[in-house]
């Protein structure tokens, strides 16, 4: 892993604003002894395996891509990981998410292995309407010590996942210029909506369609999931309406390239 401010350069969308969001997140985290770190695909999978004892379920590895983007919030020395998130382009090439479910190019972006037993049943109709430049977002995890009421990040203006999700959204939007973000979530996250305590709503995922059922996801069991997405305008709205972003009064909504270093200098 390496510090995020070392190399991120945004070239698409309102890049100066997005870079300002990342710089603000990094500064706020640093004040609390935390680091926003870039995480490679290999590091995501290794960290997932290493932290299963901390309550992180085993990830199905459908994250590999040349333009994989992973972020983690760690301690200052990047020795302990407190939260993670990752994304990669969907490479739909004119097809829809529904079709990527059907032909298994979503879970196997580098080619479906002969031994694959997976399939997706009960694909929601909405998935066939998700076309264009899509970005898959997943790999979201937070350590029990960093959750609400925990000991990590208590001095922050918002929770760790607020900083982590907005940072990933800004990075991905400023490099991929996505038409939409796409994710799959389990039923537990939908039940939170009934209690008005939905993680999905807090992080911008307002659209969600039940299904599909991921058949043979596990060696002996299926996994019912739900299809969720944010459109390109919703991504920017989610970022700009976040309390710590609004409080920072970040300017630069014009479309122009921006590096993180110039924003760090302004905050410093």
Image (tube, rainbow, N blue to C red):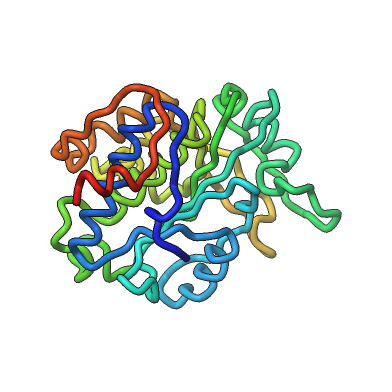
Q: Is residue 142 visible?
A: no
Q: Residue at left 64%, top 53%?
A: 64
Above or below, 170 relative to 146: above
In the image, what residue occupies the spot 60% across and 46% down? 67
The front one of 171 and 108 is 171
Q: How many marks?
A: 0
Could you say where residue 166 lies in the image, as x and y percent from the top left?
A: 33, 43
Q: Position of residue 172 (x, y in %)?
A: 47, 39
99 or 235, nearer to the observer: 235
Q: Residue 197: x and y, percent?
A: 25, 45
Locate residue 120 relative to residue 157 in the image: left or right. Answer: right
Give x and y (percent) for residue 179. 51, 26
Residue 152 sits in quarter: bottom left
Say above or below: 61 vs 12: below
Residue 9 sits in which quadrant?
A: top left
At 55% from the left and 48% from the top, the residue drawn is 224
At x 23%, y 29%, the residue is 251
Q: Is residue 106 left or right of residue 160?
A: right
Q: Nearer the viewer, residue 228 or 71?
A: 71
**Left or right placement of residue 68 versus residue 173 in this view:** right
In the rendered image, which quarter is residue 190 located in?
top left
> Is residue 37 shown to the viewer in this render?
yes
Above-or-below relation of 49 to 9? below
């Amino acid at each position: 892993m390496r510090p995020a401010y070392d190399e991120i350069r945004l070239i698409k969308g309102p890049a100066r604003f997005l870079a300002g969001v990342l710089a603000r997140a990094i500064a706020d985290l640093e004040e609390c002894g935390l680091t926003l770190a870039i995480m490679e695909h290999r590091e995501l999978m290794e960290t997932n395996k290493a932290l299963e004892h901390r309550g992180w379920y085993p990830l199905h590895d459908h994250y590999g891509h040349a333009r994989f983007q992973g972020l983690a919030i760690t301690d200052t020395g990047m020795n302990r990981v407190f939260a993670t998130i990752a994304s990669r382009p969907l490479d739909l090439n004119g097809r829809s998410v529904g079709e990527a479910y059907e032909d298994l190019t979503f879970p196997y972006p580098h080619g479906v292995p002969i031994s694959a037993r997976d399939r997706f049943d009960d694909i929601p109709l909405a998935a066939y309407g998700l076309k264009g430049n899509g970005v898959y977002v997943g790999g979201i995890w937070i350590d029990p010590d960093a959750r609400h009421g925990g000991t990590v990040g208590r001095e922050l203006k918002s929770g760790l996942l607020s900083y982590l999700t907005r940072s990933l959204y800004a990075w991905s939007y400023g490099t991929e210029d996505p038409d939409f973000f796409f994710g799959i979530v389990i039923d537990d996250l939908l039940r939170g909506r009934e209690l008005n305590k939905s993680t999905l709503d807090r992080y911008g995922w307002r659209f969600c369609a039940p299904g599909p059922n991921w058949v043979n996801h596990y060696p002996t069991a299926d996994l019912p999931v739900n299809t969720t997405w944010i459109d390109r305008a919703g991504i920017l709205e989610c970022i700009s309406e976040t309390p710590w972003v609004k409080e920072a009064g970040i300017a630069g909504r014009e479309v122009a390239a921006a590096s993180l270093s110039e924003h760090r200098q302004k905050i410093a």
